Image (tube, rainbow, N blue to C red):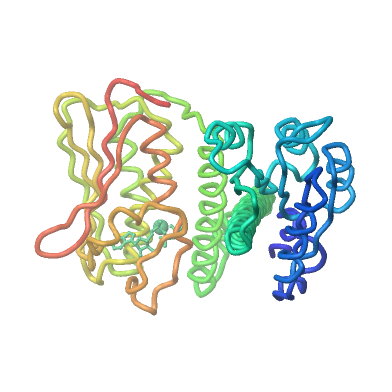
């Protein structure tokens, strides 16, 4: 969970979040003028309008008061003995909080050159003397409003940035946790699998135990595959997944896959067909990654296709430079709107598979895309006429692995 109090602090909020309630705040104006009459007039107008006022008769005193009282706005005369208004303005901008405090110069009426210099030296606005009450109050009010808006905006921006960073950190931690879990699961799952294999391999095992033990072994294999996919997807996000390429004999590997999948598919009433139309037998690939990607496509097809129906595993050459591997089924297909997203992490089509079918984690296709891209290839899904989906992985025959 994001710590909102910490977010407030990071955003530079004063006090507790309950300070958010808009209590009326008395804003403070610092009036700097060597002329006592001018100070008095400005003070009178401002106090009558509800502002707090502090007075300084010169630049040095103004700086000291600014540090002490942190006023919300400064009215600054230009011609003063000692530090003039321009020097005072430059010095105020260096004081903490001075950079974004509005400074309004008091200039001589009609002296256009002074107005220009006042603005150029870092003033936010100017007022001509003698001070006109309405003009003074309008100028002060609008500058204070602008200052409030810009502070609010800055604070919201800092708050959003803090929350975004906190979310990203939380997401990283969650992913690390998942990776730790996934890597810790590998060894116990392998032990369970080998123990089950030895029990199933025992010729004295009563037949009625065989099927439930097979089911347990398949479930374990599926969990192990999920754990490995998680680790590989994560590695690829960290740029650490490097396929180990060798010349993979495609017809041999696909026949092996077909054989294994056929055993499982027979139980669910599916038939697995293999169709080869290759100009060359081998492709440079990471055998383990490619095999697991195809296993996931076959498992998806088995999960989605009606029973009985045929799932086809196809391999064909393309444009003399690629091999295309397709897993085609007669299931509901993938809605057009989902096609771009279906390869994203944890994405599942809500309407499929039917409720009776175990929902997956939505990671298999992400892993398949990681595998395709790691080989310098592509993956996509096509419609099958009259019905079904075909997941196609195109791999280059000349290695372009990343
Ligand atoms: N052949 C298919 N036909 C129709 N929809 C499919 C097919 N293959 C996948 N999908 C949809 O895409 C989703 C994502 O598939 P993906 O393989 O990424 O995850 P999963 O199968 O749900 O879980 P797992 O992580 O165990 O593989 C599936 O949940 C399903 O909704
Ligand atoms: Mg899957």
Q: In the visual, does 46 lie left or right of 227?
A: right
Rendered residue at 66%/48% (across/down): 102
Occupied quadrant, residue 48: bottom right
Q: What is the quadrant of the C terminus in the image?
A: top left
Residue sitting farthest toward the bottom: 355
Q: Position of residue 374 (x, y in %)?
A: 41, 33
Residue 46's place in the image compared with 190, above or below, is: below
Residue 18's place in the image compared with 181, above or below, is: below
Q: Nearer the viewer, residue 140 or 383?
A: 140
Occupied quadrant, residue 9: bottom right
Q: What is the quadrant of the N terminus in the image?
A: bottom right
Q: In the visual, does 2 lie left or right of 221?
A: right
Quadrant of ligand 2: it is: bottom left
Occupied quadrant, residue 321: top left
Q: In the visual, does 208 lie left or right of 151?
A: left
Q: Tell me if I can see residue 389 in this picture.
A: yes
Rendered residue at 60%/44% (across/down): 124
Q: Position of residue 185 (x, y in %)?
A: 66, 53
Q: Position of residue 119 (x, y in %)?
A: 58, 37
Q: Nearer the viewer, residue 337 or 33?
A: 33
Q: Nearer the viewer, residue 337 or 253?
A: 337
Q: Position of residue 193 (x, y in %)?
A: 59, 55
Q: In the visual, does 160 lie left or right of 378?
A: right
Residue sitting farthest toward the top: 398
Q: Tell me if I can see residue 160 in this picture.
A: no
Q: Nearer the viewer, residue 345 or 291?
A: 345
Residue 370's place in the image compared with 117, above or below, is: below
């Amino acid at each position: 969970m994001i710590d909102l109090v910490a977010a407030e602090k990071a955003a530079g909020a004063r006090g507790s979040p309950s300070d958010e309630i808009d209590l009326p705040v008395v804003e403070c104006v610092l009036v700097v003028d060597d002329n006592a009459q001018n100070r008095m007039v400005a003070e009178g107008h401002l106090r009558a309008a509800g502002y707090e006022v502090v007075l300084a008769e010169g630049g040095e005193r103004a700086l000291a008061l600014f540090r002490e009282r942190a006023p919300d706005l400064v009215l600054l005369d230009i011609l003063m003995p000692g530090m003039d208004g321009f020097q005072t303005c430059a010095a105020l901008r260096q004081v903490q909080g001075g950079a974004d405090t509005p400074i309004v110069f008091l200039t001589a009426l009609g002296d256009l050159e002074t107005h220009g210099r006042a603005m150029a030296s870092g003033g936010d606005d100017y007022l001509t003397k003698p001070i006109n009450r309405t003009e003074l109050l309008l100028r002060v009010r609008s500058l204070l409003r602008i200052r409030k808006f810009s502070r609010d905006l800055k604070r919201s921006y800092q708050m959003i940035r803090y929350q975004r960073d906190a979310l990203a950190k939380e997401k990283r931690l969650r992913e690390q946790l998942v990776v730790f879990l996934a890597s810790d699961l590998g060894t116990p799952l392998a032990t369970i699998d080998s123990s089950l294999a030895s029990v199933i391999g025992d010729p004295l095992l009563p037949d009625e135990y065989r099927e439930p033990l097979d089911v347990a072994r398949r479930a374990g294999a599926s969990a192990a595959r999920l754990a490995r996919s998680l680790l590989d997807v994560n590695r690829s996000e960290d740029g650490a997944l490097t396929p180990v390429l060798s010349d993979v004999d495609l017809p041999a590997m696909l026949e092996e896959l077909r054989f294994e999948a056929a055993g499982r598919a027979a139980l669910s009433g599916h038939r697995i067909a293999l169709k080869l139309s290759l100009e060359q037998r081998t492709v440079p690939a990471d055998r383990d990654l490619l095999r697991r990607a195809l296993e996931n496509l076959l498992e998806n097809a088995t999960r989605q296709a009606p029973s009985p129906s045929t799932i086809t595993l196809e391999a064909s050459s393309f444009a003399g430079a690629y091999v295309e591997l397709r897993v085609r089924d007669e299931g509901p297909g993938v809605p057009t709107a989902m096609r771009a997203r279906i390869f994203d992490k944890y994405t599942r089509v809500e309407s499929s598979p039917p409720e009776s079918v175990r929902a997956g984690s939505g990671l298999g296709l992400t892993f398949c895309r990681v595998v395709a891209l790691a080989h310098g290839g592509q993956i996509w899904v096509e419609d099958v006429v009259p019905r079904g989906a075909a997941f196609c992985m195109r791999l280059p025959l000349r290695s372009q692995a990343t």
